[in-house]
């Protein structure tokens, strides 16, 4: 009599499912291996440069804005700086 048609479909379906599971496990192992080989996030951060020092005019503006110097002193500083 032979094997019924459903038997062949079942055989092929089982082979496809097993192949999908094996491929999934392999991809999972590769993914975990790649993730473990990457350096830590903190070591990937590039150091930033410190902010540039303010120029003398900016210092005078800041001191004038804080009320540390008078307007006359501020104007004298600008005159001395050539601005």
Image (spheres, grey):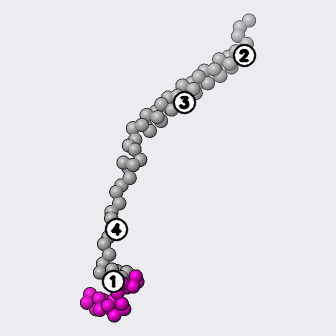
The kind of secondary structure the magenta stretch mainly shows is helix
Q: Are marks 1 and 3 in contact (CB under 8 Å)?
A: no
x then y, percent, for residue 10: 68, 18
> Left or right: 27 with respect to 18?
left
In primary-sequence order, the first of circles 1 and 2 is 2
Quadrant placement of the C terminus: bottom left
Q: Are marks 3 and 2 in contact (CB under 8 Å)?
A: no
Between circles 1 and 4, the one closer to the viewer is: 1
Magenta segment includes 36: no
Residue numbers of the magenta segment = 64-83
Q: Are marks 4 and 2 in contact (CB under 8 Å)?
A: no
Q: Is residue 66 above or below residue 27?
A: below
Residue 5: mark: 2
Mark 3 surroundings within 10 Å by alpha-carbon count, few (fewer than 14), some (14 through 19), many (20 or more) = few
> Left or right: 74 with respect to 20?
left
User: Gap between marks 3 and 4, in whole Å?
Assistant: 50 Å
Mark 2 surroundings within 10 Å by alpha-carbon count, few (fewer than 14), some (14 through 19), many (20 or more) = few
């Amino acid at each position: 009599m032979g094997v019924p048609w459903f038997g062949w479909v079942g055989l092929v379906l089982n082979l496809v499912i097993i192949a999908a599971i094996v491929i999934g496990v392999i991809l999972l192992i590769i993914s975990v291996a790649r993730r473990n080989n990457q350096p830590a996030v903190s070591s990937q951060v590039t150091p930033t440069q410190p902010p540039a020092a303010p120029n003398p005019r900016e210092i005078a503006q800041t001191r004038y804005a804080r009320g540390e110097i008078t307007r006359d002193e501020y104007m004298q500083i600008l005159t001395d700086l050539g601005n």
